[in-house]
Amino acid sequence: MAQPLALVINGRRIAARAGQTLLEAGLAGGRVIPHDCATGQCDTCRVRIHAGTVDDAGTRIGETVLACRARLTSETVIEFDEVPDVVRRSGSVERVVALTPDIVEVTVALRKRLAYLPGQYVRVTFAGLPPRDYSPSLRADGSGELHELVFQIRRQEGGAVSPHLGQRVGAGHAVKVEGPFGQAFHRLGRGRLVIVSSGVGWAPAWAVARASRLREPERGLVVVAGGRHPQNLYMRPALDWLRERGVTTILTCSGSNPPADARPGRPTLHLPMLTADDTVLAAGAPGMVAAVQFLAAAAGATCYADPFHAAERGSASKEPPTTNFIQRLLRRMSRDHGVEADLPT
């Protein structure tokens, strides 16, 4: 029989057993740790270890581990940020607007408001189509109603959902939403906040950046936003809003012929020098996110990220990862000779 242990979660002591994952122990003890995939493929269940030791299963970043993978080996004290409860809501598409030839803005009107923190994501199911994860955002002018969810979505060629937006999926189309999920949300803080995004990773980045400026206007804030193709740099009006309020903003373009107002190259090439006092938030292509996490870890900065993984149509489920982000980054670099090679933004 497994050795009985005590696990303290956000100040509450529960009985647990050696070998249980932190998530399993919490659920068995009536203390739900926020989670989504429960297979190590997202960061929703990341918790901080305050005392004790665990088998981190290769998920450790600083003092944090993934609760769905890390297993108890001793009496342990953990903590996580309280977030809104996961709920289900129904509604309908209010409108679909093309922001660029590749990116559309979809507004969903809910019958009942869904509470979430800026930067979190939700699972969206358009009637007749498979579910997809999207981050609620704001329009370029910062507008958005309490009962609305505004999504910025890139059309993926051959995708099962995005090519239908504005075609099969239009005003009045039924929608179901579940969430919120994710750990890359706005947190109040004293040190500088550095936000880095690529492509439609701008959706959560804009939500967090605007929340920070409104809630903590004196905090240092640097925003780096980029895209591969000049035509998809749709975030200019939002960057103007931030710039007018004293935010350091950097626009990048990694494709050919970058426009005059954008720096050439990927967002990671234009990050400020990070320090241990910084909080970094990254959103976008997995390769870019992994590179930012690597740089943040090297500087001792705190980093939050919910990387965007394009859903594979008709693919079989994959084994959960057993390596941490640095190992995954090094593996990708050895294969591709470049962190973001062949990744769409």
Image (cartoon, rainbow, N blue to C red):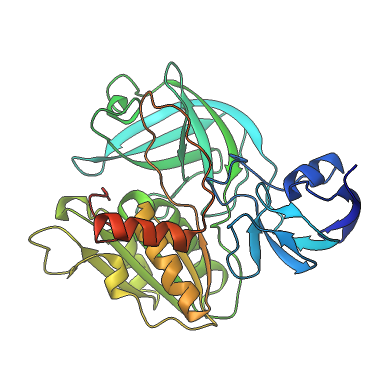
Looking at the picture, does residue 284 appear above or below residue 110? Answer: below
Q: In which quarter of the image is residue 179?
A: top right
Does residue 238 appear in this view? yes
User: Taking 324 as reference, is 65 left or right?
Assistant: right
**Which residue appears at 73% of the width and 65% of the height?**
49
Q: Where is residue 173 in the image (x, y as percent from the top left)?
A: 42, 20
Does residue 289 appear in this view? no
Between 334 and 59, the one nearer to me in the picture: 334
**Count of labels shown?**
0
Looking at the picture, does residue 38 appear above or below residue 81? Answer: above
Residue with the most extreme left position: 257
User: Taking 53 as reference, is 150 left or right?
Assistant: left
Looking at the picture, does residue 117 appear above or below residue 29? Answer: below
Q: Position of residue 50 (x, y in %)?
A: 76, 69
**Which residue appears at 38% of the width and 62% of the height?**
330
Q: Where is residue 270 in the image (x, y as percent from the top left)?
A: 28, 74
Q: Quadrant of residue 209?
A: bottom left
Q: Position of residue 226 (x, y in %)?
A: 27, 61
**Which residue appears at 37% of the width and 57% of the height?**
331
Residue with the most extreme top position: 128
**Which residue appears at 66% of the width and 35% of the height?**
87
Q: Quadrant of the N terminus?
A: top right
User: Taking 94 as reference, is 30 left or right?
Assistant: right
Q: In which quarter of the image is residue 291?
A: bottom left
